[in-house]
Image (cartoon, rainbow, N blue to C red):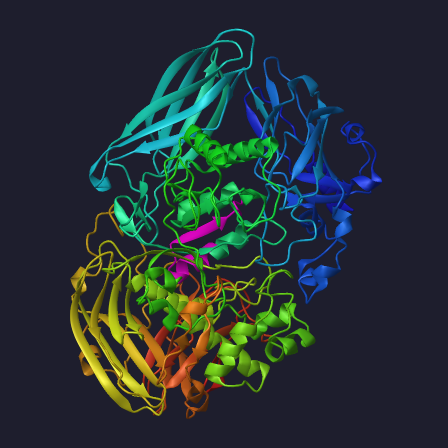
């Protein structure tokens, strides 16, 4: 009863001050329209809603029911329980209702401000229809409604939402990523605000930054502008004041202009500033993220009429097409290889800042620099977080739905756009462009995904972006299938894969026919591609699969699995993945063994993809300009397509990608038998030493490699052949990269320059040096194991006598068949190895990071050693951030690792491996 009373109180908004204000509707009462009378009558104050559902805002229908405790996601996500929800409950309109109080003041105006309602809605205030579903249309159709004549001291707002259907409505959709929520995302999924102003209304504020490159040596011209609208019937003199605060919150610039504004007219006000010696905003891998603040205030007759403020960063983004027609981005004048992944919102579109904070931390710890938002444009808080963290965001519209219902798109059989849909598209683009424009993290906007928009829609999109003073690249689509008249080729390929392919797929770039037959291999800009991996570990699987589901997971590969994809998708079984797993590693004898083999397969799949793209960044022929892994995370507990699972637990897919994405790395190309050197920083340079060896599974050293090289910033190059020779068994290839010239590691020390205050390696977790100062390389070459040669990266590859043979001519959009699989089965029959583990120094530092050392006490390699943190019940602690995991130790080798504890309740560390018996270390 106390909780319900508090919730009711939250519905009361009070605006008693004479200054302008914005108040968010904090909670909703909601009910199906089947049980209710006409909504206009419900929009009068003092209606009894005690029998309705009550939930904090914002929320879709199912999101509200979950927040209200009517349902639980742990139950809905267990096995196939989600399919038991009766979808007919959501096939009719629903009513959202809230009350708010005002203290009206003469000369003040009141507005209802929407930002996202799916799919369409009627709005009522105090018994009056404010807007109908033809106006409030589309998931991103934010609007501002003047309700000044309708409001009183006590007021009621009713929103009648209509069912969403991505085949006909311009809404969010999961395509085939996972089953659709039963409500199809219907509801008030973004915040609604009550806004009061004086006689002049301030529209969306844009911050336009002009600065020449080299960006570190020029002043920045900053133009703060916004439309201002006279709400009165008389000419007004409006003082427009713009103030700039530096990243520390200090006022550094102020300028004012006076505008004479005729009755009911709109004027675009502009105020220009020049910032000398600006602090530059960088992507996280290159530097720091200083954020300025622009404040814009309108004053009429010495009283504030309206105001707004936005943070912004000083940076530049551009793109161009290479000679091969591939998109190449540049940030702050430096060529920027996009290494990103596709984002999935919560399945019920619930925004949780803590959830995104963990996703962002995983993104940085992985070493990724970009997140793609395909139609899942989320909330302003996402862009705020990305600005602060230095993660680039690549938003755009979604594929395979009404968004791409064009006559030229023969892949869809949908009704073409009506005039009303073009208007919805205009409002959607205008709203999203205004929301995103000031954010330095935004890399560009994709106005199409699998297909490009027709010319009419393109004009609408580009005009809306121009009106918002958009500054970053606008790209026609995420594929090369065509482009509209006003834009050139997209420069992005969408040729798959989406299901399992072998590691050598990515380096197999040379075709006797042409590049295009190599599809997703490491050249050009791959807008969405991956080997379809991401099998969760046992601790997560038990949270959402029944015992029967777990049995089917590894014994019935052709059976459609509810947690794979939608029921209409070609990805609903594990047929392709399972065939490769069994053919390459052998038939598992238990679920535990199956999951261990799956982590091995996932690790080598994601490492190979990201290593190939980073290695070929500067390739002489068809360089690899970008890669968006499909996908970063999942909307719900999924069995594939994510680098970490819905519970934020990271498995083989995560740590394989992490191993490939270090700022400095040495890469083995198994297709050519070659070694590549990668440097993703802007300032690290100097002498490096590469050490390598080939070792048999019984610990015999077969070959060595030692190379002294010089690394350059933002580079990747082939160094040398490292041919393992004619093999008759699986071998381990170990490569490590060491710094020789200690003083040149970080380059310049300019606080505002490239890499200043940036990560030493993959940030977001403990430092990723593959060990600490006490590392002993064991059996590696003596040239790398003495002196002050700091280890920068290390990789261990399991190399078969013969690589997988790809059947390129019979590729589909989602995979390339394999005619002959590599034989890796001997890895399961290695001699037993013994691992010891000990804590180094104090238990934890201030960042809750624990340092420890692993030692292989055996004469054979300890292969694919996994570390996991568990609680006193043996359940996974999530999230945790290991500096390295799923690693292999050569005979006698000691390796230092660190773990950052993001979750609570850590009691033990469990260590296990392919040929290592599980050992545990208690954490006091």
Q: Nearer the viewer, residue 398 or 400?
A: 400
Residue 531 percent across, percent down from the top left: 46, 67
375 part of magenta stretch: yes
Residue 848 percent across, percent down from the top left: 44, 63
Task: Residue at 31% x, 68% y: name it.
Answer: 769
146 part of magenta stretch: no
Quarter assignment of residue 916: bottom left
Answer with left or right where residue 641 lies relative to residue 324. right
Residue 765 percent across, percent down from the top left: 40, 62
Task: Residue at 70% x, 43% y: name it.
Answer: 163
Q: Nearer the viewer, residue 221 or 868?
A: 221
Task: Residue at 70% x, 60% y: name it.
Answer: 82
- Which region is colored magenta? 360-378
How many numbered discs, if any? 0
Residue 749 visible somewhere in the drawing: yes
Q: Say if 693 sits above or below 215 in the image.
A: below
Q: Nearer the viewer, residue 360 or 568?
A: 568
Q: Nearer the viewer, residue 811 or 746?
A: 811
Residue 844 visible somewhere in the drawing: no
Residue 621 percent across, percent down from the top left: 25, 59
Q: Say if 175 sits above or below 116 in the image.
A: below
């Amino acid at each position: 009863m106390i909780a319900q009373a508090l919730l009711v109180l939250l519905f009361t908004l009070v605006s008693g001050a004479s200054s302008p204000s914005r108040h968010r509707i904090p909670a909703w009462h909601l009910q199906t329209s089947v049980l209710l009378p006409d909504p206009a009558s419900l929009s009068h104050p003092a209606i009894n809603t005690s029998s309705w559902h009550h939930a904090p805002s914002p929320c879709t229908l199912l999101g509200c029911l979950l927040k209200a405790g009517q349902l639980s996601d742990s139950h809905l996500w267990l096995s196939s329980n989600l399919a038991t929800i009766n979808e007919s409950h959501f096939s009719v309109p629903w009513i959202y209702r809230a009350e708010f109080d005002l203290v009206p003041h003469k000369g003040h105006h009141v507005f209802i401000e929407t930002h996202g309602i799916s799919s369409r809605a009627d709005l009522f205030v105090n018994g009056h229809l404010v807007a109908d579903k033809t106006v409030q249309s589309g998931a991103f159709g934010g609007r501002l409604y003047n309700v000044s004549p309708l409001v009183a001291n006590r007021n009621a707002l009713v929103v009648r939402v209509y069912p969403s259907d991505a085949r006909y409505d311009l809404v969010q959709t999961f395509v085939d990523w996972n089953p659709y929520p039963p409500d199809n995302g219907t509801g008030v999924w973004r915040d609604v605000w009550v806004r009061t102003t004086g006689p002049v209304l301030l529209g969306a504020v844009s911050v336009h930054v002009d600065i020449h490159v080299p960006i570190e040596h020029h002043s920045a011209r900053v133009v703060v502008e916004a439309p201002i609208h006279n709400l009165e019937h008389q000419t007004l003199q409006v003082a427009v004041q713009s103030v700039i605060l530096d990243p520390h919150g200090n006022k550094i610039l102020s300028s004012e202009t006076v505008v004479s504004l005729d009755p009911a007219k709109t004027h675009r006000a502009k105020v220009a500033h020049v910032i000398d010696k600006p602090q530059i905003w960088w992507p996280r891998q290159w530097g720091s993220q200083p954020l300025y603040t622009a404040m814009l205030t309108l004053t009429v007759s010495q009283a504030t009429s309206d105001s707004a403020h936005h943070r912004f960063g000083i940076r530049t983004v551009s793109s161009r097409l290479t000679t091969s027609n591939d998109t190449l981005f540049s940030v702050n004048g430096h060529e920027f290889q996009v290494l990103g992944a596709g984002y999935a919102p919560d399945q019920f579109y619930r925004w949780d800042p803590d959830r995104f904070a963990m996703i962002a931390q995983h993104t940085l710890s992985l070493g990724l620099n970009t997140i793609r938002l395909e139609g899942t444009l989320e909330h302003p808080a996402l862009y705020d977080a990305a600005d602060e963290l230095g993660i680039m965001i690549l938003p755009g519209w979604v594929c395979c739905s009404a968004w791409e219902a064009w006559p030229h798109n023969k892949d869809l059989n949908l009704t073409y756009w009506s005039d009303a849909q073009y208007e919805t598209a205009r409002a959607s683009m205008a709203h999203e462009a205004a929301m995103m424009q000031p954010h330095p993290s935004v890399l560009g906007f994709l106005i199409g995904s699998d297909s490009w928009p027709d010319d009419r829609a393109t004009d609408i999109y580009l005009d809306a972006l121009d009106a918002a003073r958009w500054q970053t690249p606008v790209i026609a689509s995420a594929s090369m299938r065509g482009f509209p008249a006003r834009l050139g080729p997209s420069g992005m390929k969408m040729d798959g894969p989406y299901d399992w392919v072998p590691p050598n797929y990515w380096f197999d770039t040379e075709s006797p026919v042409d590049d295009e037959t190599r599809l997703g291999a490491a050249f050009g800009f791959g807008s969405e591609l991956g080997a379809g991996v991401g099998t969760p570990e046992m601790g997560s699987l038990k949270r959402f699969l029944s015992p029967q589901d777990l049995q089917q997971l590894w014994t019935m590969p052709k059976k459609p699995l509810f947690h794979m994809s939608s029921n209409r998708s070609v990805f609903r079984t594990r047929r392709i993945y399972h065939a490769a797993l069994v053919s390459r590693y052998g038939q598992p004898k238990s679920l535990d063994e199956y999951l261990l083999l799956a982590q091995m397969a996932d690790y080598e799949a994601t490492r190979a993809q990201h290593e190939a793209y980073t290695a070929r960044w500067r390739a002489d022929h068809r360089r690899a300009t970008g890669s968006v892994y499909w996908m970063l995370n999942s909307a719900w507990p999924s069995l594939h397509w994510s680098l970490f699972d819905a519970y934020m637990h990271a498995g083989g897919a995560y740590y394989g990608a992490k191993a490939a994405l270090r700022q400095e790395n040495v890469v083995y190309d198994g297709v050519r038998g070659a070694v590549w050197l990668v440097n993703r920083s802007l300032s690290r340079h100097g002498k490096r030493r590469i050490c390598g060896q080939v070792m048999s599974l019984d610990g015999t050293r077969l070959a060595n490699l030692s190379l002294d090289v010089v690394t350059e910033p933002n580079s990747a190059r082939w160094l040398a052949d490292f041919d393992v020779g004619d093999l008759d068994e699986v071998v381990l290839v170990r490569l490590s990269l060491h710094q020789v010239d200690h003083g040149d590691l970080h380059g310049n020390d300019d606080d505002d320059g490239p890499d200043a205050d940036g990560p030493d390696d993959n940030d977001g977790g403990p430092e990723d040096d593959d060990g600490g100062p006490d590392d002993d390389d064991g059996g590696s070459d003596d040239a790398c194991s003495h002196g002050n040669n700091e280890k920068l990266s290390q990789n261990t590859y399991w190399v078969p006598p013969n690589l997988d043979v790809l059947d390129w001519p019979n590729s589909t959009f989602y995979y390339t068949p394999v005619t002959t699989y590599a034989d890796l089965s001997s890895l399961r029959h290695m001699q037993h190895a013994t691992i010891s583990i000990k804590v180094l120094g104090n238990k934890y530092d201030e960042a809750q990071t624990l340092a420890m050392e692993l030692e292989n006490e055996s004469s054979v390699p300890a292969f694919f050693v996994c570390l996991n943190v568990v609680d006193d019940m043996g359940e996974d602690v999530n999230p945790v951030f290991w500096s390295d995991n799923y690693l292999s130790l050569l005979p006698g080798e000691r390796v230092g690792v660190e773990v950052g504890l993001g979750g609570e309740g850590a009691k033990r560390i469990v260590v296990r491996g392919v040929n290592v018996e599980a050992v545990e270390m208690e954490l006091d």
